[in-house]
Amino acid sequence: MNSSRFHGKVALVTGGGTGIGRATARAFAREGATVVVAGRGTEALSGTVELIEKEGGRASLVTADVTVEDDVARVVETVVERHGGLDVAHNNAGILGRPGPLADLDSDTWRRVLDVNLTGVFLSMKHEIRQMRARGGGAIVNTSSTIGPHLRRPMLAAYGTSKAGVSALTRAAALDHIGDGIRVNAVSPGASDAPMSLLPGESPEQRHERLAPSIPLGRVGTLDEVVGAVLWLASDEAGFAVGHDLVVDGGASA
C-alpha cells in the first residue's frame, strides 16, 4: 500500500457509495488516509467500507443528506469525534436530474439538482472549513463537471447551471479561506467510466460508441484518471494550486 501522501490524514468523501466517490475513497485509503464516506445509501456506503477494509485500509460511514444542514454538520462532527480532526474533504455528492428542454423542466427537478449539486457543496464546505480552520488548515476538492463551467450540452440546463455554480463557489471559498491555510479546488471530469454517464439500459460499449466521437482522445476517461486529479489537488504536491478547476475530459472542452 502506498501511504506516502496521506499517511496520518483524515479524509471525508461525500457521495462515497458509488462511482468517482467510491474510487476516490479507496485511493485515499491506499495512500494512508483514514476515510469516512458519507451519503444517503447505507448499503452502497457499506460496500465502499468493505472494499477499503479488504485492501487493508481504515474506513467508516455516516449516512446523511447533503441538502440538510443538520445532517452535514453531524457528518463533520462525527468525523472529528471519531478521528480527532479533518484534513481532507472531497465533496462529490451529485445527481444528473431528468434530462429535457428548459421549457419542459419541472420546478421540482430544478430545485433538487441545485440543492444536491450546489447547496450540498456549500453546506459541506461551510462545516468542513470551520473544523479545518480550527485545526490550522486542510484541503478541499469539489467535484464539478465540464458541463456547465466549460461546455454546454442540450437538455441539461439544471445540471449545467449547478456545476457552473460549483466552479464559481470553489473559487470564492478559495479566496475567502486560503488565509486560514485551507486550499479549495475543483476537478471537472468529462465523460468517465461512472454510472452517471450511462443512459438507462446502456452498456459501456454502447456508451463508447455514443460519446467517443465527441472526445478528441477517442474514449471516456477511467475512474483512475479522475481520481488521480482529485488526489493530486488534495495533496501537498499541489500546494500552490488555489481556486483551480482542473479539467479532465480528454480534450472535449479544449
Image: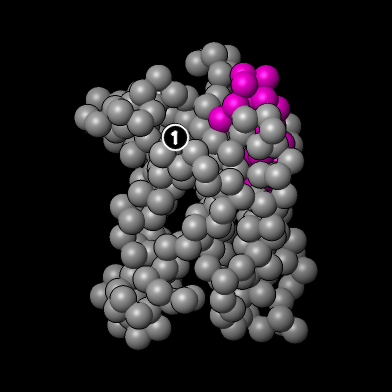
Q: Residue furthest right?
A: 107
Magenta stretch bounds:
118-138
- Residue 27's quadrant in the figure? top left
- Please name whichever residue, 77 or 147, is drawn nearer the observer in this view of the structure: 147
One can see residue 56 in this view: yes
One can see residue 112 in this view: no
Residue 135 is covered by the magenta coloring: yes
How are the colours assigned in the image? Answer: one colour
Left or right: 175 with respect to 55?
Answer: right
Above or below: residue 201 compared with residue 142: below
Above or below: residue 121 compared with residue 195: above
Q: Position of residue 110 (x, y in %)?
A: 72, 66
What secondary structure prevails in the magenta region?
A: helix
Which residue is drawn at the image coordinates 38% and 60% (left, top)? 194
Which residue is drawn at the image coordinates 61% and 34% (left, top)? 182
Q: Position of residue 191 (x, y in %)?
A: 41, 69
For disc 1, the marked residue is 236
Q: Secondary structure at mark 1?
A: helix
Left or right: 235 with respect to 245?
Answer: left
Q: Residue furthest front?
A: 240
- Please name whichever residue, 37 or 248, is drawn nearer the observer in this view of the structure: 248
- Residue 106's quadrant in the figure? bottom right
How many residues crowd mark 1 within 10 Å: few (<14), some (14–19), many (20+)? Answer: some
Left or right: 16 with respect to 160?
Answer: left
Q: Position of residue 232 (x, y in %)?
A: 41, 44
Q: Position of residue 83 (x, y in %)?
A: 50, 16
